[in-house]
Amino acid sequence: MKKIAIGCDEAAYDLKHIIMEFLESLGYETEDYGVYNKDASLYPDTAVKVASAVSKGKHDRGILLCGTGIGMAISANKVPGIRAAVCHDCYSAERSRKSNNAQIMTMGSRVIGAELAKQLVEIWMKSEFQGGGSTSKVDKIMEYEKGFISGGVCSCKE
């Protein structure tokens, strides 16, 4: 059984609970990383908690929710080893896994409704990295990341 980390800001508090119930109905185990009420919060804190847990292998995947999904993705992608993608349609949900091996999906509660969010979660959870031509691209992303972390100069051509 896959273990899924989930977190949100106050804008997506209600959607988080809908998604957690949905995941559990599909047989997945979830762990809630907050927020735990509708008080104003700083979404980067939640994003980094979830992304760190996924990066360390505590969870197989993570789902982050905010108003647009964008801020959560940007924040989660600051954690080394993480690939987080905003998913607001079926194709992006599927391809974020199959082509980019994203471990975290983000969605915006002000962009999509609960039923579409559940559909996207199901597609994303069923999708696996296909490798093939995408492997070298994902490897290159990780190579650049390692170069920036070590303080080296990236090998990109200007």
Image (cartoon, rainbow, N blue to C red):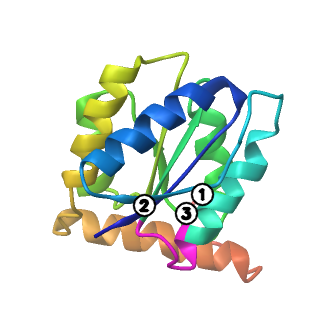
Identify the disc placed on residue 157: 3
Q: Give the foreground label among 3 and 2.
A: 2
Reading the chain from its start, which is encountered first: label 2 or label 1? 2
Three-letter code, disc 2: Gln
Are the residues tagged 2 and 1 within 8 Å (C-beta)? no
Q: Give the foreground label among 2 and 1.
A: 2
For label 3, the SS is: loop
Of the 4 image quadrants, the one containing the C terminus is bottom right
Q: Which residue lies at the image location 20% right of the left edge and 54% below the top edge?
A: 127
Please give left or right for residue 100 compared with residue 39 in the image.
left
The span picked out in magenta is 54-60
Residue identified by numbered label 2:
103
- Between 4 and 147, the one lying in front of the other is 4
Identify the disc placed on residue 110: none
**Main SS, magenta residues:** loop
Q: Which residue lies at the image location 31% right of the left edge and 23% below the top edge?
A: 116
Please give left or right for residue 111 compared with residue 99 in the image.
right
Of the 4 image quadrants, the one containing the N terminus is bottom left
Are the residues tagged 1 and 3 within 8 Å (C-beta)? yes
Please give left or right for residue 105 compared with residue 67 in the image.
left
Residue identified by numbered label 1:
158
Q: Which residue lies at the image location 39% right of the left edge and 22% below the top edge?
A: 114
Reading the chain from its start, which is encountered first: label 3 or label 2? 2
Q: Which residue lies at the image location 73% right of the left edge and 83% below the top edge?
A: 150
Q: Where is residue 113 in the image (x, y as percent from the top left)?
A: 41, 17
Three-letter code, disc 1: Glu
